[in-house]
């Protein structure tokens, strides 16, 4: 039986659990722990009470209210706000994921170095 890497490449022979092994020879325990921490942080972040942002008043003369221009203006404002919120979240969690992957990658590099130095001696 063979397993697939997350990127779709096949692995022949199913020896051990290769789940955490698709980008580097990482320590599975460390990886799982890090992921669990990351997930917990995300959940706790999501469960924090949101601060209600006071809606920006778009002041316009009354006759323009029926106007499509006005509607579009409001829509764009709302869209911008939503995107801002989305981006701030993405930044926060993206950085977390990036740091995690970097950390694991460096760990793996060290491990490979150690392994190679052992081989030569």
Image (spheres, rainbow, N blue to C red):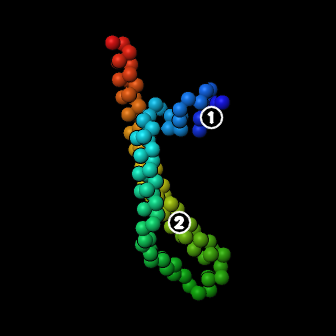
Asked which quadrant contains residue 14, the reply is top right
Residue 118: x, y in percent? 35, 18
Q: Is residue 45 above or below residue 77?
A: above
Q: Residue 51: which numbered mark, if any?
A: none
Asked which quadrant contains residue 4, the reply is top right
Asked which quadrant contains residue 119, the reply is top left
Q: Image check: 103 left or right of 61?
A: left
Q: Residue 82: which numbered mark, if any?
A: 2
- In primary-sequence order, the first of circles 2 and 1 is 1
Query: How many numbered discs, if any?
Result: 2
* Residue at which label 1 appears: 4
Query: Which residue is pictured at 45% across the width and 38% down the height?
Result: 28
Q: Residues within 10 Å of mark 2 (few under 14, many from 20)?
A: few
At mark 1, the secondary structure is strand
Q: Cα distance, mark 2 to mark 1?
A: 37 Å
Q: Is residue 35 above or below residue 10?
A: below
Residue 106: x, y in percent? 38, 34
């Amino acid at each position: 039986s063979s397993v697939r890497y997350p990127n779709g490449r096949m692995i022949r022979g199913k020896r051990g659990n290769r789940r955490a092994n698709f980008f580097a020879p990482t320590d599975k325990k460390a990886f799982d722990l890090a992921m669990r921490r990351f997930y917990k942080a995300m959940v706790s972040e999501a469960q924090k009470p949101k601060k209600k942002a006071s809606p920006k008043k778009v002041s316009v003369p009354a006759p323009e209210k029926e106007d499509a221009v006005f509607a579009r203006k409001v829509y764009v404002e709302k869209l911008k706000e939503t995107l801002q919120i989305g981006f701030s979240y993405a930044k926060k969690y993206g950085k977390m994921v990036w740091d995690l992957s970097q950390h694991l990658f460096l760990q793996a590099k060290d491990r490979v170095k150690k392994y190679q130095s052992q081989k030569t001696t």
